[in-house]
Image (cartoon, helix red, strand yellow):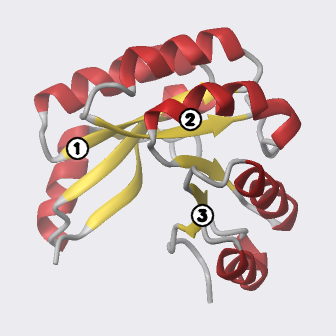
Amino acid sequence: MAIIDVHAEIGTTPLWGVPFTDANLTRSMQKYGVDRSIISSTIGNSCDFRRGNAQVARIVKANPALLGCVVANINYPEQSQKEMHAYLADDSFAALLLISGARRKHVTLAESEEILNAHRRFVKPVYLHTPDQAAALAANEMAKAFPIMKFVLIGMAGEDWRMATVLAERTLNLVLEVSGSSS
């Protein structure tokens, strides 16, 4: 059975300030028997989604064990849609990560609807950072509004992970990324 890491970040982590390169990731993948990883960029996730997406495109082109995750910022719907069209048609990109552009602020249906409508044609999962119950409930609302899409809860609602499992049980297109500090 293949092991796939559905969410890895390449770049300098704000918390530690240590760069985590594609070479670091590849070594970790080999060490733990991971066949593929879907990556986004810390630059794309934190401050410049277009620059981060270009960085990921260069990396996945050079390493077939890595697949890209396009980052789209809900505050820039036109630019986000251009990024989606530029990368998601390519088989080396496997997912879309929607971000709010603000730390600790989750994405809502009202803010993301335009981008999600444009994303329907790509048939690739949508990742959402869900650090808490409010974020998981917002993701559930998106999943119900777009039943043909898969939504992956990155972070699985943190301390509220039990509630996230109930949501995923009831909403069939809601998938949990099992990792982190769940007890």
Q: CA distance from mark 3 to mark 1?
A: 24 Å
Q: Name the residue carrying label 1.
A: 66
Query: Given the image, on which type of amino acid does mark 3 rest?
Result: Asn
Q: CA distance from mark 1 to mark 2?
A: 23 Å
Asked which secondary structure carries label 3, the reply is loop
Q: Name the residue carrying label 3.
A: 173
Residue 136: x %, y % from top left: 77, 63
In the image, is residue 25 above or below residue 1?
Answer: above
Tell me if label 3 and label 1 are in contact, CB under 8 Å.
no
Asked which secondary structure carries label 1, the reply is strand
Specify few, some or many for label 1: CA neighbours under 10 Å numbering under 14, 14-19, or 20 or more: many
Q: Earlier in the sequence, mark 1 or mark 2?
A: 1
Instruction: Tell me which corner region of the image, top left, top right, bottom left or bottom right, holds residue 100.
Output: top right
Specify few, some or many for label 2: CA neighbours under 10 Å numbering under 14, 14-19, or 20 or more: few
Query: Given the image, on which type of amino acid does mark 1 rest?
Result: Leu
The answer to which of 125 and 64 lies nearer the viewer is 125
Query: Given the image, on which type of amino acid does mark 2 rest?
Result: Arg
The answer to which of 85 and 105 lies nearer the viewer is 85
Tell me if label 1 and label 2 are in contact, CB under 8 Å.
no
